[in-house]
Image (spheres, grey):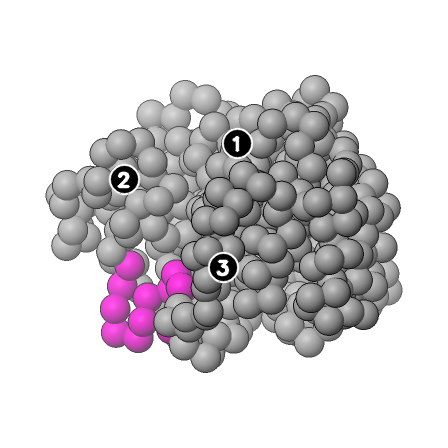
Amino acid sequence: MRALAYFGKGDVHFTHDLKEPKICSPDELILTIAYAGVCGTDLHEITTEGDPNFFPLDGHRHEISNNELPQAMGHEMAGVVSEVGPAVTKFKVGDHVSVEPTGTCRDRYRWPDAPNANKPKCSACKKGMYNTCAHLGLIGNGVQSGGLAERVVINESHCYKIPKDIPLEVVALIQPIAVSWHAVGVSRYRQDGSVLILGGGPIGLTTILALNGHGCTDIVVSEPAKIRRELAAKMGCRVFDPSKYSAEEGTRILREMAPGGDGFDYSFDCSGVPSTLRASIECLTFRGTAVNVAMWDRGKPIDFFPMDITKQEKTYTGSMCYTYHDFEEVIDAFEKGLIDPEKARHMITAKVPLERGLEDGIMRLITHKEETIKVLITPNNFGELDDHHRTAKL
């Protein structure tokens, strides 16, 4: 089948010849992919100077599945059920589905011929915290082929039925919103708490939506790119341009923007650079909580000063992926109107066909980051393409 696939470090290209998925475990189903979003994690796997975070190194295969390359990329998926296995009970052909794309110890049974198929669960998975599995991987990033292909096979426990009144292009945003929803949970957010988001890229913007779903509407977003600030403002936030100030002056102004003028109760670092890590801590009020949501490069330590936390009893923590609770609660928030689908749709910069996914999706995000938020790739040409590709198709 057609796919945009990862063949090895530095080698991602379109192919007509990726192996078709097939149902091997009775609880699996096959989805026809409507849309798959390109994520910052995908870009990191391609552009990093060091080792990729999720794809296995050359000559190795993923611990959970032992699947070889090439594999279709793409883990932000919206699909339509096209085939179900004999043990599937929750889905039927034609259902609209969002996918939780993790691969963890709980999924080993799907690949009984893998060398580690009978390995005991790691400590995190034994405790039910599979989002921090010692062998955590992603569908579309090393465990198995993902959504940048015509079809994907996945087990039922990773799928969530979506009401058909939610547009499929918005369904493709549920996975990144779930990332942010989990981060808000990790922060132990209390209603009426003041919030700073550092970085107005896709995860920064989905953090706005997740906070909206928790009843938070007074949010400050710090972001240097004009288009992203404008979008954050359109989504109801106050915005700040850190590029106009020194780090010290910017921190002072941000602290003053918080209610009370002495720092925020919560900060979410959605950029993952040394300056935003420092700001996430320095812009907090006493006993504030900073949550790192960003993916950092492996093996690149930065300066960290424990007394910046200790003096005011602040908390610094990280948030990793999501659990099924997060998906269920995000979907419920959409159904109850706590998250506005139209506000979510603002994030979509373009929808492009699979054949142009590398040039007009991945590379566009790498080379025109300041002008692009979320690119959706549609392997089966669902819905309307963006203006450029609609014209080209005609």
Report x, y in % for residue 98: 55, 37
Res. 315 visible in picture: yes
> Within the image, what quadrant is residue 226 found in?
bottom right
Residue annotated with mark 2: 124
Type of the residue with mark 3: Met
- The one nearer the camera, 285 or 336, is 285
Where 228 falls versus 10 (above or below)? Answer: above
- The one nearer the camera, 75 or 136, is 136
Name the residue located 67 percent from the left edge and 49 percent from the top edge.
197
273 left or right, relative to 5: right
Residue annotated with mark 3: 295
**Is residue 53 shown in magenta?**
yes
Q: Who comes first in sequence, dot 1 or dot 3?
A: 1
Q: Who comes first in sequence, dot 3 or dot 2?
A: 2
Residue annotated with mark 1: 188
Q: Give the range drawn in magenta.
A: 51-62
13 left or right, relative to 358: left
Numbered disc 2: secondary structure = helix
> Within the image, what quadrant is residue 336 found in?
top right
Name the residue located 64 percent from the left edge and 72 percent from the top edge.
366
> Badge 3: few (under 14), some or many (20 or more) residues near its Cα, within 10 Å?
some
Report x, y in % for residue 99: 50, 40
Report x, y in % for residue 18: 44, 63
Name the residue located 39 percent from the left edge and 26 percent from the top edge.
88
- The one nearer the camera, 184 or 72, is 184
